[in-house]
Image: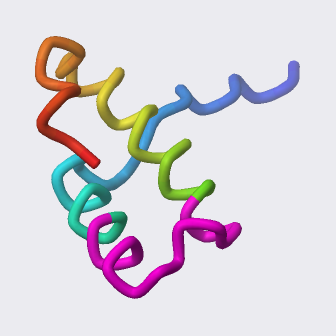
Amino acid sequence: MPPTPATPGTARPAAVINEQIRALVEQGGVRSDEYLELLVEWEAAVRSEGLRSDVTKAA
């Protein structure tokens, strides 16, 4: 029997990822691959934390 896949999610809180995004934006890294990866990670964290009503405060 194959192992059950891990539940998708993020290991870091959305607030931590958001701070990293803000720092990258201040450095002008908005067009970097790292920025896009952080946005995807942040969105997953927001979903897993149930923060959908608070999205306007982030990134």
Q: Which residue in the rendered view is the most extreme toward the top?
A: 53
**Residue positioned 55% across, 42% down in the render:** 40
Question: Residue 55 appears in which quarter of the rendering?
Answer: top left
Quadrant, the N terminus? top right
Confirm whether the magenta stretch covers residue 23: yes
**Residue positioned 18% across, 21% down in the render:** 51
The percent coordinates of residue 50 (x first, y second) are 21, 17
Please state if 34 lies on the left or on the right of 11 as rendered: right
Q: Which residue in the rendered view is the most extreme toward the bottom?
A: 27
As rendered, which of 25 and 34 lies closer to the eye?
Answer: 25
* Residues rendered magenta in the picture: 22-35
Q: Is residue 39 above or below residue 30?
A: above
Q: Is residue 5 above or below residue 53?
A: below
Q: How is the image coloured?
A: rainbow
Confirm whether the magenta stretch covers residue 7: no
**Residue positioned 86% across, 25% down in the render:** 2
The percent coordinates of residue 12 (x first, y second) are 31, 55
Q: Which residue in the rendered view is the most extreme toward the right?
A: 1
As rendered, which of 7 and 17 lies closer to the eye?
Answer: 17
**Residue positioned 55% across, 30% down in the render:** 8
